[in-house]
């Protein structure tokens, strides 16, 4: 068991992309803080593994296999989660992709339009699908909390991501502010996280020299860990953070500080 304060007791949370990296850390942190967690991932085995780790730590979780880019699948997932756990209070739109080719992003001048469409479908439309499926029950019950996983790359040029990635992450910031205004009267807070370079499978796809350069350019002289991002998500989704809404919180150790 853990000594994490139980600030999420009684809450039902869903985390997309919970089979790996930051999503898994957020799912585990929410569970350790008292929430019952639905771990959703397109990789069903990975979702099962996360749910198993949470159950092994003595908490309640269910695994959901779902591609967030497919509306019918997300709508079905919402029905399954509500039937299995109850209405969802907390939605973390974390699932995301950043395609590379031999460790490098496609240049815009050569990018396959299908790759552009896929990144937007997963990273941005996937988050809309999550909100469309899960927020109505939050509004009906008069409490909810939504966190969208953006990135510092939404705010400044980075030469190791393709143009689709920051476009999708900047879209999430616009969506966050619009939703904060629209859903605030229903007592739902909506925020975005903007992680810097966090050590996960997603960031290991590039030349290690790229990550070392980021580390040296980071005020705190280290790369982030998934748990660093989970800590910010815990705050925003707790009662203590509920009056914070429409914000973009950098979790970047001072890299690309703004
Ligand atoms: N790692 C970083 O440095 C970093 C920095 C900024 C933002 N982010 C963002 O954080 C989020 C998580 O990244 P990560 O580093 O943990 O990546 P990761 O690759 O370790 O995990 C992503 C998870 O999302 C799942 N996923 C992918 N497509 C999906 C889909 N269509 N439907 C459902 N699940 C899907 C994958 O199966 C995987 O389990 C992403 O949105 C990413 O863009 C990461």
Image (cartoon, helix red, strand yellow):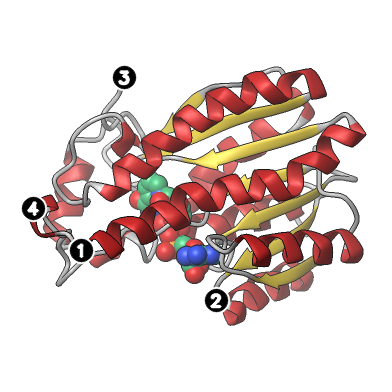
**CB under 8 Å between callouts 1 and 4?**
no
Q: Which mark is residue 112?
A: 1
On the image, the x and y values in percent for residue 152 come to 33, 35
Q: Is residue 60 visible?
A: no
On the image, the x and y values in percent for residue 35 come to 81, 50
Q: What is the spatial separation of the Cα atoms under label 1 and label 3, in whole angstroms?
A: 32 Å
Direction from residue 206 to residue 57 in the image, left or right: right
Q: Residue 43 carries which label?
A: 2
Between marks 4 and 3 in the image, the one whose residue lies nearer the viewer: 4
Res. 102 image quadrant: bottom left
Between marks 2 and 4 in the image, the one whose residue lies nearer the viewer: 4
Between marks 1 and 3 in the image, the one whose residue lies nearer the viewer: 1
**Ligand 1 image position (quadrant):** bottom left
Q: Which mark is residue 213?
A: none
Q: Name the residue under label 3.
A: 258
Q: Nearer the viewer, residue 95 or 25?
A: 95
Q: What is the spatial separation of the Cα atoms under label 2 and label 1, in whole angstroms?
A: 24 Å
Res. 195 image quadrant: top left
Crowdedness of circle 1 by 10 Å Cα count: few (<14), some, many (20+)? few
On the image, the x and y values in percent for residue 117 come to 35, 57
Nearer-N-terminus badge (2/1): 2
Nearer-N-terminus badge (3/2): 2
| Whether the residue under disc 2 has CB within 8 Å of ligand 1 | yes
Q: Nearer the viewer, residue 144 or 35?
A: 144
Q: Mark 4 points at which residue?
A: 109
Q: What is the spatial separation of the Cα atoms under label 4 and label 3, in whole angstroms?
A: 29 Å
Q: Residue at x 72, y 60 (%)?
A: 75
- Element class at badge 2: loop
Nearer-N-terminus badge (4/3): 4
Between marks 2 and 1 in the image, the one whose residue lies nearer the viewer: 1
Q: Residue at x 51, y 57 (%)?
A: 95
- Element class at badge 3: loop
């Amino acid at each position: 068991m853990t000594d994490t304060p139980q600030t999420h007791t009684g809450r039902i949370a869903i985390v997309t992309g919970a089979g790996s990296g930051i999503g898994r850390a957020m799912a585990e942190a929410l569970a350790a803080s008292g929430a019952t967690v639905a771990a959703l991932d397109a990789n069903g085995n990975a979702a099962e593994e996360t749910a198993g780790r949470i159950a092994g730590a003595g908490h309640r979780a269910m695994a959901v296999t779902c591609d967030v880019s497919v509306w019918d699948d997300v709508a079905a997932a919402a029905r399954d989660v509500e039937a299995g756990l109850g209405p969802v209070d907390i939605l973390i739109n974390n699932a995301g992709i950043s395609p590379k080719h031999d460790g490098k992003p496609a240049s815009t001048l050569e990018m396959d339009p299908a790759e552009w469409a896929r990144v937007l479908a997963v990273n941005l439309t996937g988050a809309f699908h999550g909100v469309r499926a899960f927020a109505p029950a939050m509004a009906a019950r008069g409490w909810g909390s939504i966190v969208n996983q953006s990135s510092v790359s939404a705010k400044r040029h980075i030469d190791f991501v393709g143009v689709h990635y920051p476009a999708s992450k900047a879209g999430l910031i616009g969506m966050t502010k619009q939703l904060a205004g629209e859903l605030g009267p229903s007592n739902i807070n909506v925020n975005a996280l903007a992680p810097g370079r966090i050590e996960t499978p997603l960031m290991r796809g590039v030349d290690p020299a790229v990550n070392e350069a980021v580390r040296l350019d980071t005020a705190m002289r280290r790369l982030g860990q998934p748990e660093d991002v989970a800590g910010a998500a815990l705050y925003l989704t707790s009662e203590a953070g509920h009056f914070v809404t429409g914000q973009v919180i950098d979790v970047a150790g001072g890299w690309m500080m703004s």
